[in-house]
Image (cartoon, rainbow, N blue to C red):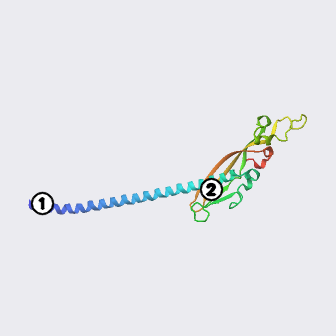
């Protein structure tokens, strides 16, 4: 019996080595998988951050356009002083060079316009008084019976497309804004959306 017992531990040592190597390979595979998963998650997070920066730049550009009335007068040059015609450039990482370019494409345009009737004006409001000035109702004069004021309510569409050539991030933001404009703009077909 002593001879048999001496033979068993030798066999067990070889199996232990093989089991140990298999466990080591499994641990290595788990480590590699965890590393790849972490790397992929970091890449996804970076892509989401780059896209959000592009969205933020596009929104900031539309806010700059809306804050001035230049887009009403000259939609083809709605962002003066930008980095190009209807363009604005943004440095998002603070290194002093522009990272994201936002382009208004197509240029701001009128989606809807409606002449304000004199009857709907509140002449106690200064903005409404301007619309009623100079309007007289003379029968027999062309257009005198329409009841139209000098103003119109317009809805403008502003599309801003942002792109970052380094990260390939891109985003488009569409904003609508209601603006009171002179009634003459109602007949300006060059400012209407196609």
Quarter of the figure that contains the N terminus: bottom left
Q: Pointer 2: what residue? A: 162
Whether residue 92 is visible here, answered yes or no, is yes
Looking at the picture, tell me which residue is in the foreground, 90 or 48. Answer: 90
> Is 136 left or right of 2, judged from the image as shown?
right
Q: Residue at x 33, y 61 (%)?
A: 25
Give the mark, 1 or 2, whose residue is nearer the N terminus: 1
Give the crowd class for mark 2: few <14, some 14-19, many >=20 residues within 10 Å: many
Q: CA distance from mark 1 to mark 2?
A: 78 Å
Q: Position of residue 192 (x, y in %)?
A: 75, 47
Looking at the picture, tell me which residue is in the foreground, 24 or 172. Answer: 172
Q: Pointer 1: what residue? A: 5
Asked if marks 1 and 2 touch (Cβ < 8 Å), the reply is: no
> Is 158 left or right of 38, judged from the image as shown?
right
Looking at the picture, tell me which residue is in the foreground, 191 or 127. Answer: 127
Residue 20 location, quadrant: bottom left
Q: Position of residue 180 (x, y in %)?
A: 74, 44
Whether residue 150 is visible here, answered yes or no, is no
Identify whether 120 is placed above or below 7.
Answer: above
Secondary element at tag 1: helix
Q: Residue at x 76, y 51 (%)?
A: 73
Give the crowd class for mark 1: few <14, some 14-19, many >=20 residues within 10 Å: few
Residue 5 location, quadrant: bottom left
Secondary element at tag 2: strand
Residue 154 location, quadrant: top right
Residue sitting at the far left: 1
Looking at the picture, tell me which residue is in the foreground, 167 or 126. Answer: 126
Q: Residue at x 59, y 56 (%)?
A: 54
Q: Position of residue 17 (x, y in %)?
A: 25, 63
Residue sitting at the far right: 140
Q: Position of residue 84 (x, y in %)?
A: 70, 61
Q: Nearer the viewer, mark 1 or mark 2?
A: 2
């Amino acid at each position: 019996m002593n001879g048999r017992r001496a033979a068993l531990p030798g066999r067990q040592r070889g199996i232990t080595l093989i089991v140990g190597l298999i466990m080591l390979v499994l641990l290595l595979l788990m480590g590699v998988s965890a590393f790849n998963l972490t790397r992929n998650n970091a890449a996804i997070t970076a892509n989401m951050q780059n896209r959000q920066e592009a969205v933020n730049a596009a929104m900031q550009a539309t806010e700059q356009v809306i804050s001035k009335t230049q887009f009403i007068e000259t939609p083809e040059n709605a962002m003066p002083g930008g980095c190009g015609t209807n363009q604005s450039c943004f440095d998002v990482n603070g290194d002093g060079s522009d990272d994201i370019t936002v382009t208004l494409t197509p240029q701001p345009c009128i989606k809807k316009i409606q002449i304000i009737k004199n009857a709907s004006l509140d002449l106690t409001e200064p903005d409404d008084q301007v619309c009623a000035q100079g309007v007289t109702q003379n029968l027999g004069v062309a257009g005198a019976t329409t009841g139209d004021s000098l103003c119109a309510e317009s809805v403008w569409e502003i599309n801003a497309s942002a792109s970052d050539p380094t990260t390939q991030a891109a985003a488009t933001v569409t904003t609508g804004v209601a603006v009171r404009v002179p009634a003459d703009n109602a007949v300006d077909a060059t400012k209407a959306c196609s």
